[in-house]
Amino acid sequence: MEDHSAFPRFFFIFFITTVTHLATSVVSIGVNYGQIANNLPSPDDAVALVKCIGATKVKLYDADPRVLKAFANTGVEVMVGLGNEYMSRMKDPTKAQAWIKANLQPYLPATKITSIFVGNEVLTFNDTSLTSNLLPAMQSVHTALVNLALDKQITVTTTHSLAVLQTSYPPSAGAFRSDLAPCLAPILSFQAKTGSPFLINAYPYFAYKANPKQVPLDFVLFQPNQGMVDPSSNLHYDNMLFAQIDAVYSALASLGYGKLPVHISETGWPSKGDEDEAGANLENAKKYNGNLIKMAISSSKKGTPSRPNSDLNIYVFALFNENMKPGPTSERNYGLFKPDGTPAYPLGFSLASVPNDAINNSTGTGTPPRPPTSSTGYLSISSASSLERYSLVGPSLWFLVTVVSIILKF
């Protein structure tokens, strides 16, 4: 285990005016906190970093008791994941209730757990067993919450890859894959009845990587560009993210669920990659995330072109670079922070220091090594199937960051 006794005791955040703007913005900023690494700082230090970037929500891939305890009394909303490996067991309401009582209930209400996502991108795993177990597992978890009188504060949902879409261009023609519609319809009905959002994981990086000569980089990175006009709706899009979100809204509407809110549960851009990973570099990561945060907190950018009055709820991927994730180099370089707590790259915002006690008096000794098995489906976001699907349906999410270290000056 690496020694983290030197974990930085000073961090940076936006100037107070920027923090105030974030707090009052319609944008809900979240961050994914994965732990497929053996060199991460303690959960208490991680909480300090989440606060440092102004995030009000965090998405976890499991119910790590150390992490749930660390977020107690912070006001940060916590989404907890039940990995794909839990699907068959969670079909049994008794087992679902036992899991909630053992893993979540002890931390309530101090830890603000607001959602459970059951399964990660299940419908695009091409696993009939997982697919058939998904809705029953979601229903059982919800039933357990009802029995425990927790259903008013904790919703039940699941995350999807944008590969659930058969058509994503133009946005107004967005449609789900015909082979998935029979599975999606009852899931959407369940979510509409229980009031949970439709979660999408989307990575514009993959769209660019798959076809860098054809995909305009400026359109993907929120840089000035001519954009595109949807020929049916006549709506103008100046970035791929909003086009993808609206394609999802169109697909939902085509099945009769146009009022279901869409949240972006993952998105990000790697700051480093292999030679054949086009676009994976610090400069592009900085532009993507920096432009996205500026756009997100702008009062003139409340929603998407087709849903201008719908709030944006976005979780950036990810809090840390995770050194035990399998796959290409990019997989281990999506983090906003390095394991020592310094930023992976600067975003160019004005920063102000945070005193030592912002670290919640954590020891900074690091967390024990964790095997890369916390959640099936989370280990690699760029597997062969993932590359194929993202080459079709590009991107999504945003991120919020602006962090850190004394040595950071931009």
Image: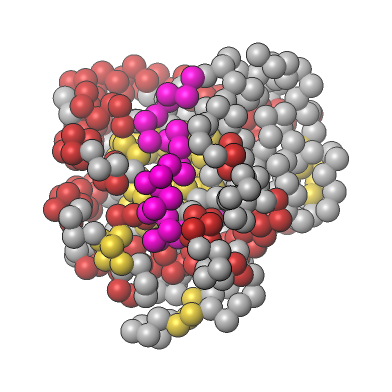
How far across and how far down the image is residue 365, in percent?
69, 16
Q: Which colour scheme is used?
A: secondary structure
| In this picture, residue 4 sits left or right of residue 373 | right
Q: In which quarter of the image is the N terminus?
A: top right
| In this picture, residue 96 sits left or right of residue 292 | left
The correct choice, above or below, for 335 with respect to 313 in the image is: above
How far across and how far down the image is residue 58, in percent?
51, 39
How far across and how far down the image is residue 17, in percent?
73, 56
In this view of the protein, can residue 46 be seen by the observer?
yes
| In this picture, residue 213 sits left or right of residue 45 | left
Work out which residue is located at the far front of the displayed protein and give it. 276
Rendering quarter of residue 248: bottom left
Total labels: the figure holds 0
* Residue nearest the observer in this picture, 226 or 352: 226
Residue at x 56%, y 68% (from the top left corner): 213
Q: Give the range drawn in magenta.
A: 371-399
The correct choice, above or below, for 111 with respect to 24 in the image is: above
Q: Does the magenta stretch include residue 260?
A: no
Residue at x 37%, y 31% (from the top left corner): 376
Residue at x 81%, y 41% (from the top left corner): 353
